[in-house]
Image: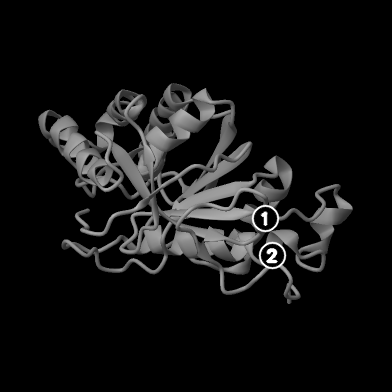
Amino acid sequence: MTHDAVLAVNTWRPARFMVIVAHPDDADFGPAATAARWIDEGSEAWLVCCTSGDAGADDWRQDPLELAATREAEQRQAARVVGYEGITFLHQPDGALANDLALREQLVRELRTFRPDAVLCVDPETIFYSDGGVNHVDHRTAGLAAVDAVYPAARNAMAFPWLARDGLAPHSVRRLYLFWTNRPTVAVDIGTTLDRKLEALRAHPSQIREPEHLEPRIREWAREEGERIGVEAGEAFRVIVIDEDQEPVAGAEVAAAAASEPAG
């Protein structure tokens, strides 16, 4: 995605973070290099896929259960490359993902279990990309469900109270890093981990139609984002700060719903 504005260099790193996406491979086309860099620097990370990608084939005769099993195996391999602690598949319907109470309860359970400082997800406001193209409805839905699960549900003691009774106490996520956004505020230098991103993407052969074009395309995107912070390769994010701390993110956009407001 091409943009012109100069971005701030991201200087904040979460001790624990969660990546929430719609499909297997979304996290690897998205923030995989940032995730790999943060993990190399000491962060712990967990990946959540809302669906198993059972509709991700060109041939209508493809068995969706076999495809889901294939794509889960591909994503597990890619997750090992990046370095995630683990991965959860929520088994929601591919192509029909809904931001409903059932999905948000699943996400809140994941958030209260892993207890991340930051969540990385698709910017749900991106319907049309600024340089052309339409953002998949499942991507937008997963992004909005992740945001809604983060604020207010995961921190609200009255949301899904049976989770608290099961020992999953409310948890406050401090920041959102929104990717595939038309309104980026920061970028992460991924010069040391871009090759890991490419390796993770190669773990998804069922989804790569023209593998010979994959690396040039990813490197060009990374070059464009890196130029905006004066480095060779970057990944850009729109950062939403929900809870301030002693080291605020440069250039971050403060969430409209401040943590001091009641979560209800």
Q: Earlier in the sequence, mark 2 or mark 1?
A: 1
Callout 1 amino acid: Val
Task: Identify the image quadrant of residue 93.
Answer: bottom left
User: Which residue occupies the foreground of this view, 180 or 209?
Assistant: 180
Is there any visible trace of residue 173 in the rendered image?
yes
Q: Is label 1 in a helix, a strand or a loop? A: helix
Residue visible at 52% across and 61% down in the picture? 240
Q: Residue at x 43, y 51 (%)?
A: 22
- Residue 211 x/y as whole percent: 15, 30
Quadrant housing the C terminus? bottom right
Residue at mark 2 to residue at mark 1: CA–CA distance: 7 Å
Q: What element carries label 2?
A: helix
Residue at 35%, 38% (x, y): give it.
67
Decide which of 93, 135 is in the foreground and name it: 135
Measured as percent of width and height from the top left, residue 34 is found at 42, 36
**Quick check: 247 above or below 233?**
below
Q: Nearer the viewer, residue 44 or 91?
A: 44
When asked about the image quadrant of residue 220, the answer is top left
Q: Residue 108 carries which label?
A: 1
Report the residue at 40% width, 63% height from top.
140
Q: Quadrant of residue 68?
A: top left
The image's colouring method is: one colour
Callout 1: 10 Å neighbours few (<14), some, many (20+)?
many
Q: Is residue 92 visible?
A: no
Is mark 2 in CB contact (under 8 Å) with mark 1? yes
Q: Residue 153 carries which label?
A: 2
222 vs 42, left or right, is: left
